[in-house]
Amino acid sequence: MYGKQSYLHLGENIDVDKYIITEFYVESDKSILEVAEALAAESSIGTWTDLSTMDADIMTRLGARIFYANEEEHIVKIAYPLGLFEAENIPQLLSDVAGNVFGMNEIINLRVRDIIFPKAYLRTFDGPAFGISGIRKLLGIPERPLLGTIIKPKVGLDADRHASVAFDAWVGGVQVVKDDENLSNQSFNPFEERVVKTLAMLRKAEDITGEKKMYVPNISAQASDMLKRAEFVKAQGGIAVMMDILTVGFAGVQYIRDQNTGLVLHGHRAMHGAFTHSTKHGIAMLPIAKTARICGIDQLHTGTIIGKMHGGEEEVSAINNAMRCEWGNLKKTMPIASGGVHPGLLQKMIELIGNDVIINLGGGIHGHPDGTKSGAIAASQAVDASIAKIDLNEYAKDHKELQRAIDKWGVYKDESLLVPKNNSLITYTYGLTEGLM
Ligand code: 3PG
């Protein structure tokens, strides 16, 4: 019997080219070192007891190494030898570092705060096919923040009305029109009919405006159906598709990316709150977003800071940095700010998030008092004002669509919204400050 082994290597200098590093927040009745040992064993090679089948070679080659543990901060950092992982296999990665550990009796709360990947691991993935520069090239917009809309109501319109609302938004000035995350192939709006009709309207809008437009149909479904739908979109001349990355799962995302369809992959993060909402438990949005970039998502919902979705400035900025930074062989993922956005928020949002972003307004366009086209014009005017650095209220004086939007929703002015929401325990600095990802 190979006796019970310790995974403790506190203070050890970890070679970041040879290990995947995971940073955990941990709460337990046991001491931090006891629980760290249990975590390291369960997430690498061990179990609750010593084993007749274990040997020193396995332990040395593949055992996880706890190199940092701080009882007061509740932080444990564990390095996993690269040999533990299969190339190009995100489900296997997550089954290791974010798998059984969440169900262990020792755990009161456990949160994966960050995962840091060596370049050798990243190289086994293709990453985004287009990335920020590819998307900007497709749309012919080199610098300006991009504007998008989600057709509303979320579901319920038939294919004709869906296409006609999309047309109004495009001619009003948005570049991107997307389906909502829960619209797929329902009987009231069949996928193929919607794609054909909406792309016909896209071409009409392109002729009228002289601008390139993007339609992003939601292909989320079982993998074989997603592929059929992506191929249909491509055959109809579409340039993008959307997947709900968490509900279809990373295997689904990888499957579609591996087909090299030549389509921009848009990632919606519906269900992320189940993992990300608590500051003490679950999986932070930062490692989820990094994983999406690795899997090849070109444009990803990452938060709005001041919209309707959870996620403050510190968190969203860290995620967006992780999407836009140089990272091994992977192209950059375009952040999407979506959820509760209206024209009166755009100036502040661009100031906080920057220009490399797609800002999506659903209710904030289709809820405009004068309809979708006026809503899209108002949003476009708000972007113009932001680029020209003119106060929105001032600009609205001779831009009536913007004025009507401001009359309904107001202009952002509540600085208290900038206080990170419930995320004071999260620093989001570990990988980034050390120049690692
Ligand atoms: C999304 O897909 O992010 C939401 O549907 C946004 O909708 P909203 O702009 O109306 O909040």
Image (spheres, grey):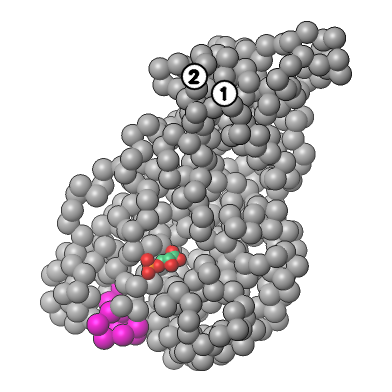
Residues under numbered marks 2 and 1 in contact, where contact means CB atoms less than 8 Å apart: yes
203 in relation to 34, above or below: below
- Seen at 18% across and 67% down, the residue is 410
Q: Hey, which quadrant is residue 344 in on the image?
A: bottom left
Say whether residue 376 is magenta.
yes
Q: Is residue 171 left or right of residue 350?
A: right
Label 2 packing within 10 angstroms: few (<14), some (14-19), many (20+):
few
In which quadrant is the C terminus drawn? top right
What secondary structure is marked by label 1? loop
Q: Nearer the viewer, residue 118 or 83?
A: 83
Q: Residue at image x 40%, y 17%?
A: 72
Residue 422 x, y percent position in the rendering: 33, 40
Check the image and report above or below for 220 versus 63.
below
Stretch of the chain drawn in magenta = 368-380
Relative horizontal placement of residue 394, taking residue 361 as reference (left or right): left
- Residue 110: image x %, image y %? 51, 31
Q: Quadrant of residue 314?
A: top left
* Magenta: main secondary structure: helix
Which labelled disc corresponds to residue 29? 2
Q: Quadrant of the N terminus?
A: top right
Residue 136 x %, y %: 50, 66
Q: Give the residue displayed 47% in from the left and 45% down from the top.
A: 276
State how many labels appear: 2
Position in image of residue 159 (x %, y %): 54, 88
Q: Residue 106 got which mark? A: 1
